[in-house]
Image (cartoon, rainbow, N blue to C red):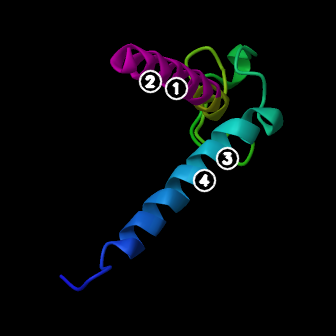
Amino acid sequence: MAPGGGTRCRGAGRGVLVLVLLVISIGPLFAQPPSDIDPLIRLRGPSGAHWLGTDEYGRDILSRVLTAGGVSLGLGALVTAIAVLAGTV
């Protein structure tokens, strides 16, 4: 492997990480409220209005994924901070 050969992969990894953080941070601002229930559009496939479709209650799946992603990242950051603090004591 050539010297510095991994820098391209690291840059791509950082780019993906920044993109995921950005989408999860600002995505919920543009998405529908994840708890809105509309039984008339239940179990629909992907469309322009619902990019990932709807679930059995008519809730937008993309909105739910974005909301859950933010919660998961926040919880992961909290657990990491606690582990770092506990490991340094």
Graded by Cα atoms within 10 Å as few (under 14), some (14 to 19) or many (20 or more), the crowding at tag 1 reads few
Secondary structure under badge 4? helix
Magenta segment, which residues? 67-89
Report the amino acid beneath label 2.
Answer: Thr
Distance, label 1 to label 3, CA atoms, is 15 Å
Q: CA distance from mark 1 to mark 2?
A: 5 Å
Checking the image for residue 80, the label placed there is 2
Residue at x 67% of width, y 30% of height: 63
Task: Identify which amino acid the numbered label 3 is placed on.
Answer: Leu
- Looking at the image, do the residues carrying marks 4 and 2 touch, with CB atoms under 8 Å apart? no
Residue with the mark numbered 1: 77
Q: Specify few, some or many for label 3: CA neighbours under 10 Å numbering under 14, 14-19, or 20 or more.
A: few
> SS for tag 1?
helix
Q: Which one is in front in this view, the residue at disc 1 or the one at disc 3?
A: 1
Residue 73: % across, % down: 54, 28
Residue found at the far front of this picture: 89
- The amino acid sitting under disc 1 is Ala
- Position of 76 with respect to 33 (left or right) is left
